[in-house]
Image (tube, rainbow, N blue to C red):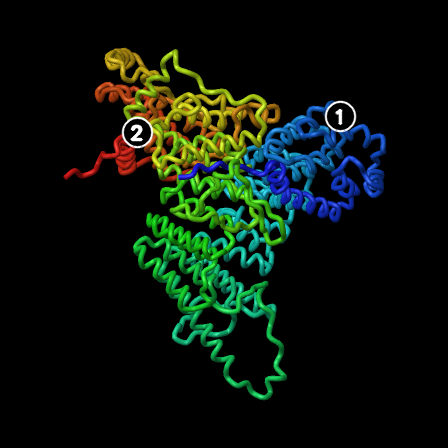
Amino acid sequence: MHRIFISVPKSPQKWCRSMSVASLRKRTSAYAKHALTSTNDPMWIAIPRLRTGTPDNRTRMALAKCNISDDDFLKWKPVLFSPSLRDSVDMLGGLTPSWVLLALAFHRVRTPSDAQDDLLRLALDNAPTLDARYKPAFLVLTTHSLAHFGIIVPMRQLVDSFLHTTQNSPFHFNTFLQALSHFAGSQETANLALAILEAMTSRQIPLWLPTYRSLLKDRFVTLQLTKYLHARMIHEGVVPSAEHLEAYLKIFARYGAIHEAGEYLKSIQEYCIQHSLTPPYGPIAEDASHPQTEGVAHSANTHYLKSMHADRASAFHYLHYLLQLDNQKRQNIALPKPSHSIHCSLTPRPFLKTNKQSVDIYDWTTTLVSVASDLRISTSTFIRLFENARTRTKAFRPTIATYTVLLRGLLWRKAYNEALEVWDQLIDSGQALDRKALTVGIQVLTRAGHPQKAFYLLDSFVNERPTNAKGAGTRPHFAESQSAPSHPTRSSPTSTQVPHFMAHRINIIVVNEFLVSLLRIRRPDIVFMIWDNLELLYGVLPNNVTLNILLKSALLAVKMDRESVRGVISHLTLKTPFRTGQPSPLEFEDSYSKRERVARGIMEALEDPEPPSVVGIWRGRTAAEVAREIFRGMIFGNWPQTQHIQAPVTAVRPPGKEGTPIAPIMEVAKSLVVGLSHKAAPALVNIGGADQTSTLDSQSQKILGPGAIPTVHPSQLTFLAYIKLLGLSSFSYTHEIPLVLAWMRHLSVRPSRFLLSISLVFWAEVSLRGPIFEEWAEKGGYSKYGRLERWIREWAKEEGWENMDPREADMSKALFVVARMRDRNFGTKHR
């Protein structure tokens, strides 16, 4: 195989930076226009114009209207136009004018580090000096920047500050919610939005229709928030617009709520009739043998069809129904019209804007989703359905989305060779790849045994530079002419064709799917390399899913090295005092050279399709140890107050003493002594709970500390992956599990019964004594295992959670899962 050297344009960082902040600038500019209209404050003319250090006459006039003299501008000019936001913040001291702080927040946030470090520092150190009129605006601008880069962790404190300092202004509350809606949807963002919405209800602040529309965006809204907005709209008597109705339909369809989606489709029909619009087709008529032809095929029908993604029969039934309606409609149009038809009114306008003329490829693609997810359909049947639709009618000519659905279905069926053939068909079709198609293509190449080509494809997409409005671009150049890459999509290097790309930046979702694919082919070593260089390679920051993948990769690396003699020996040598250290990075290496070196290193590592003999040594230590350090750094850095949280219970045996020969004898002695004299332990109250640090002055604490990953707000799945890592790593970290549960309680992360079951199984290994002595301890109230059980029950009672306690079936399942994780052959039948 030819060695591939990845290279990039000479100024990739500048280009990526300009691309990444373009949408942010658009949002902040729109906010300034809205603020000017609502407040008539000339400040919102001046601030957008402070982009360069040479103000024109209009800028000087705008500054003068804000009582900012030329001398004031010259005084603060070095701060406003320093090389970086960090330099600007370092130069500030004492009382800083509000217009300077607003201008810095408006213009100078260009990178993730600008947002998560310098902008937050600006907010903490200087926001108290802001004029009260501009504090809400400053928080809105800050939220726009944090949302753009996905930095969710500081938002809890910013929301509290906003609610505390903002008067009952409909403009400020609505624009703050609109800024918040640019985050990706999660439980945390939904909770933040609900906190603001409830404050608006209590203060009788109206929610504007554009704000409803912002909160109902696909990227942001959750089902919990949707139901709240639906109830609020009814309670306040708000008449939904056409866009609101379609937004509700899309959301319920995405979650597979067929009944609710059907109700909104009917509401859309009623809306159209009331406003003299042509309605979309409705749900299946009661008498399907004589379908009603009133209406047209519309994207609303496609959304409703999407709600049947888990019900193949219903999806095909509804598609057939739509085809019947279209055929009958065409027959009616072909009939001769009566002579008086010239006096009929014009055709009503359609509902919203749609290019649909009839049932089309989008409806067929949506139906294909239900087939793709039904694994009872064989691979050959699945492909045949796709081919029949492609060859029998021009109306169903596959789009890039159709190919994407087909490829995903083949991946779910583990039909990697067939998926590779379809991927080649897609590339040969000449269709431009969108982000979703790129993602599935990377998955196909990796799972089919070509991870190097997948990495090259991803790197090519990152460095694609649009040169015209159609998104055409230039190829990345290569370090050596003889190393021109082979076709990144084919199994044989017979072509140098690279697929066309659309002008979209990749996001963390694309990278996460590549990391998952690497995990599936047992290449955790590459996952570690990409994690260490994530922003350098792709200009993105990790999110909760990325951290979840990293923890699973560390656990896989531990297991793989245990299966290898060389791996075991390598881990043993880590404990020797004479081992060689890690090579230090090159001094004064610029980001371009570093990126090229890192990309080349990954390509060379992927030349061998098999993983190396040792994958669990990362940064000169075990992967489990490094992953644990990253997770703990994230917890303590994101929420510095968690450093004061104590574990609700300690282990019977101290760390590292579980296997010593004398440990059981010492436990017998302890049990006899304690069993004769120990009184029942008092009920545990708020041990490690959310109220433990409530006395701390949150405003005096730093928002972020060392090791913070502010784009990560861990879910219960992330905590589950971390608990598995603690329980299965080579070192003894099981004793830390109660502390992890205390972190979850503090962060209001609700655990599943499975997480609690796994935690108790691991905890039993370091907390249970022998049967007789454990019985004495339980009766005396000092059983370590029993104390954790009681603490969990109190946690559930405090939160009002029902059915929280793990049942016998849950514990049996957890025992089996732990045994299988330690031994892949556990529970298998041997013949």
Residue at the disc numbered 2: 761
Q: Quadrant of the C terminus?
A: top left
Where's the N terminus, which quadrant?
A: top left
Question: Dot 2: within a 10 Å radius of its alpha carbon, few (fewer than 14), some, or many (20 or more) residues?
Answer: some
Give the residue furthest to the bottom. 339
Q: Quadrant of residue 16?
A: top right
Residue on which disc 1 sits: 95
Mark 2 is on which residue type? Val
> Marks 2 and 1, how far apart in space?
57 Å
Q: Position of residue 589 (x, y in %)?
A: 57, 25
* Residue 203 visible, this angle: no
**Front-most of 1 and 677?**
1
Viewed as shown, does residue 148 lie left or right of 521?
right
Residue 386, image x, y percentages: 38, 60
Along the viewing direction, whichever of 296 and 357 lies nearer the viewer:
357
Q: Position of residue 108 (x, y in %)?
A: 68, 35
Q: Secondary structure at mark 2?
A: helix
Residue 776: in sight, yes or no?
yes
Give me the residue at 41% from left, 16% from top.
Answer: 580
Q: Residue at x 31, y 57 (%)?
A: 380
**Toward which corner of the image does residue 730 lie, by quadrant?**
top left
Residue 376 versus residue 156 in the image, above or below? below
Place of residue 648 in the rendered image (x, y in percent of width and height, measured from the top left): 40, 23
Q: Is residue 396 left or right of residue 467?
A: left
Q: Is residue 585 left or right of residue 825?
A: right
First in sequence, mark 2 or 1: give its number.
1
User: Which structural element holds mark 1?
Assistant: loop
On screen, residue 291 above or below 49: below
What is the count of numbered marks? 2
Q: Amino acid at mark 1?
A: Leu
